[in-house]
């Protein structure tokens, strides 16, 4: 069975919805937010790509949102955007639907707040709402409740490879005919720990740049969510793209297996990968692109790359981006060309998705 993408929902530092993402890809500058952080050396301001979830009020009553933290709002907004894009907000049109949520870091921001409640002088004890929202699968639970879905519900935490793992699971569910459609996506929020780690990394990188001026700057720390609606190809008339192949594994010995495609989208955020690491996976002269300047450094960046690849396939064009081998300029994308979304993780792990 062939599986296609028929709906996409995104929210990040660039805004929410595919039009906002496309504007950012076409060169509309994504503005950074200065996030205040208290350190032992004193307060600092760290530029980050933060997301606004206020459009969620168009889908969910405000009284319901009061119980949700930022992590859950990110996931719910992107999920609703994907369902609306696939024209499946009407429950009678969905059939049997599964929900899969991937996250690299989970509700870490809320978790830190719950563990250290006494730093806020107005709060004299731990909040029950913060506690209930501190688990990683809270986003999947909120999504299923908001959509009124009772089908299979799964949360995956696999560090940098969380989204590829979730996507592979969703494709498997459809191939097994366990469900008629799958809502699958990734969500990660910005925590002060992530922002401070980026700050320290950037200081180290600035030192290296004085030694090697060709050193590329790290993308800003980011947050966001990206969801997809997947269906069997024979049930969709105008999909975004066909998922030709998904693969996930670990390098045990050389020579390594390489994904074969015409253009490579590289996910360079997270814990493990550097541009030099990706170079080992590419054939000489390979065309590559990186869009981390749009969504930032976050663990589920491969979800955004998959969304950009699907949008490129629908529009038959490649958006301008930076690359580690031969950067891809803005140009037309012939219908017979494939896009490889490649992600490297910790411990010599890898994942890729090929879209046709």
Image (tube, grey):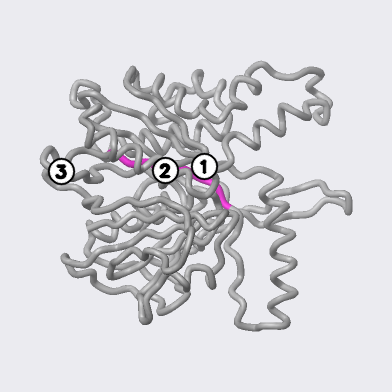
Task: Verify whether residue 172 appears in magenta.
Answer: no
Can see residue 328? no
Could you tell me which quadrant the C terminus lies in? bottom left
Camera-nearest label, 3 or 1: 1
Give the SS element for disc 3.
helix
Residue occupying the point 23% across, 53% down:
244
Q: Are marks 3 and 1 in contact (CB under 8 Å)?
A: no
Task: Verify whether residue 224 appears in magenta.
Answer: yes
Q: Which residue is mark 3?
A: 233
Residue occupying the point 69% across, 49% down:
35
CA neighbours of label 3 inside 10 A, class few (<14), some (14 to 19), many (20+)? some
Give the SS element for disc 1.
loop
Can see residue 72? yes
Residue toward you, 231 or 279:
279
Q: Residue furthest right?
A: 41
Q: Which residue is mark 1?
A: 158
Residue toward you, 314 or 63:
314
Could you tell me which quadrant the N terminus lies in? top left
Q: Are marks 1 and 2 in contact (CB under 8 Å)?
A: yes
Ranked by sequence position, the earlier of labels 1 and 2 is: 1
Count the labels in the image: 3
Ranked by sequence position, the earlier of labels 3 and 1 is: 1
CA neighbours of label 2 inside 10 A, class few (<14), some (14 to 19), many (20+)? some
Q: Which residue is mark 2?
A: 165
Q: Position of residue 216 (x, y in %)?
A: 59, 74
Look at the image and give the residue range highlighted in magenta: 222-229
Give the quarter of the image for residue 346. Answer: bottom right
Residue occupying the point 51% across, 63% down:
293
């Amino acid at each position: 069975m062939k599986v296609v993408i028929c709906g996409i929902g995104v929210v990040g530092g660039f805004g929410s919805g595919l039009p906002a993402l496309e504007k950012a890809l076409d060169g509309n500058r994504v503005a950074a937010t200065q996030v205040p952080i208290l350190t032992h050396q004193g307060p600092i301001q760290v530029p980050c790509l933060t997301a606004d979830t206020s459009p969620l009020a168009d889908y969910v009553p405000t009284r319901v949102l009061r119980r949700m933290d930022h992590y859950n709002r990110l996931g719910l907004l992107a999920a609703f955007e994907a369902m609306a894009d696939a024209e499946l907000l009407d429950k009678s049109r969905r059939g049997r639907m599964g929900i899969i949520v991937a996250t690299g870091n989970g509700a870490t921001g809320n978790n830190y707040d719950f563990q250290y409640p006494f730093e806020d002088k107005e709060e004299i004890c731990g909040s029950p709402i913060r506690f209930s929202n501190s688990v990683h699968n809270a986003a999947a639970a909120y999504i299923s409740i908001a959509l009124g879905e009772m089908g299979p519900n799964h949360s995956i935490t696999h560090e940098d490879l969380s989204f590829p793992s979730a996507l592979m699971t969703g494709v498997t569910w459809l191939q097994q005919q366990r469900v008629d459609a799958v809502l699958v996506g990734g969500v990660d929020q910005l925590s002060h720990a992530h922002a401070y780690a980026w700050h320290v990394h950037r200081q180290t990188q600035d030192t290296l740049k004085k030694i090697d001026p060709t050193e590329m700057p790290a993308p800003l720390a980011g947050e966001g969510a990206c969801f997809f609606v997947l269906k069997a190809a024979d049930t969709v008339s105008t999909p975004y793209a066909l998922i030709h192949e998904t693969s996930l594994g670990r390098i045990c010995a050389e020579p390594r297996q390489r994904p074969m495609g015409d253009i490579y989208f590289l996910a360079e955020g997270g814990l493990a990968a550097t541009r030099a690491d990706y170079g080992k996976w590419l054939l000489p002269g390979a065309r590559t692109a990186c869009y981390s300047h749009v969504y930032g450094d976050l663990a589920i960046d491969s979800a955004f790359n998959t969304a950009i690849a699907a949008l490129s396939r629908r529009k038959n064009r490649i958006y301008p981006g930076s690359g580690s081998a031969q950067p891809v300029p803005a140009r037309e994308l012939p219908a017979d060309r494939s896009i490889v979304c490649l992600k490297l993780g910790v411990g010599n792990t890898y994942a890729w998705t090929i879209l046709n």
